[in-house]
Amino acid sequence: MERAEAPGAGAPVDDTDIGALRDAVERAVDDPAERAVAVERLGRALYRVERHREGLASATAAAGLYREAGDEPAAARASALAGLLLAALGRDDESFRRLAMARDDFETIGGHAVDVAMCSRAGADALHRLGRPDDAYQELLFARAKFEAAGRPVSVARCDHDLGILLHELGVPEEALEMFTRARKGFLAERFPEGVAACDFNLGFVLQELAAFDDAVECLQLARGIFEATDRQHEVAACNQNLAAVLWDMGRDAEAASRLEDALGLYDQLGDTASVVECEQNLAMTSQAEHVSGPTRAVPSPGLASPSGSFA
């Protein structure tokens, strides 16, 4: 059976594409195998344009059609796509269950180590959102081991980055520091600047908590430089906001205020009203005569991206 593939990386999807895919589904009404592929392709395209409810219906239908045709790997792949769509709809409990079922199916079939790992990483994201960081940590460790065995170094580094976030949330900043450092080395070795910047940002966050202020400033400046070079303006603003908090802790009040003004200006350009208000409050705080409390920080960077792979 022909495998359904998502549009190429960065390829735009518009209403014309969706219409053409719907026509393909209709034309395949008398061929169950061809119809399954067409329905899955439609589900992937709907996922790309964030029409998640329609995409979920297509992915679920595709999984059923593949099972009727006896194509269990394709059925597991479509089921995993449905799990991602459930997550996009905020139905994290259902998402985790669907992804776990797809992972088990891939393991039973055999020969799909990367798909197993993708399901586990996506499942860890769902568990994290459900407030189960310990379970998410174990799920990520499982995914990391699978990625490492399959020779997927960027995916290994992504897992290390997200493990660092979980370790920070679990109250072990020293271990989080080690994990972010390991992830950074992995991204650097693979020439993946987005990952390096995310790690530097989070290293700065944790180093401030450990009172390693000079190192925190260096990491945040490195992250800001990469984000500026890649036109990630919201992340640039977050770096400036966190630099302000570190500089305030160092007693460099004027520099802290300057970085806050930079952050406020960018947030304002981006239309991020909540962050603008937060920066305005922080600026008012820095104008006080006494250090009552420091400026609030932008939170640690979340996972690099929605998990994706052969099933998404």
Image (spheres, rainbow, N blue to C red):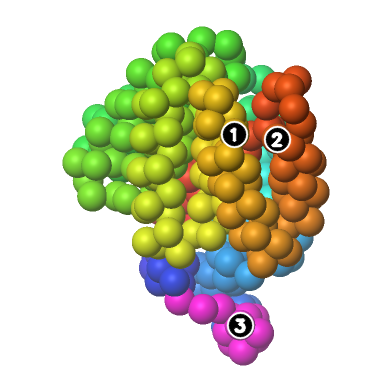
Please indicate, yes or no, whether residue 28 appears anywhere in the rendered image. no
Q: Residues within 10 Å of mark 2 (few under 14, many from 20)?
A: many
Q: Amino acid at mark 2?
A: Thr
Look at the image and give the residue range highlighted in magenta. Answer: 11-22
Question: In the rendered structure, does residue 13 fall within the stretch colored magenta?
Answer: yes
Q: Which mark is residue 286?
A: 2
The mark that comes first in sequence, 3 or 1, is: 3
Judging by the rendered image, the residue that carries numbered circle 3 is 14
Q: Nearer the viewer, residue 208 or 186?
A: 208
Which residue shows up at 55% across the image and 25% down it? 251
* Disc 2 to disc 3, C-alpha distance: 47 Å
Judging by the rendered image, the residue that carries numbered circle 1 is 253
Task: Name the quadrant containing residue 13.
Answer: bottom right
Which residue shows up at 64% across the image and 34% down it? 297
Main structural element of the magenta stretch: helix, strand or loop? Answer: helix
Please indicate, yes or no, whether residue 191 appears anywhere in the rendered image. yes
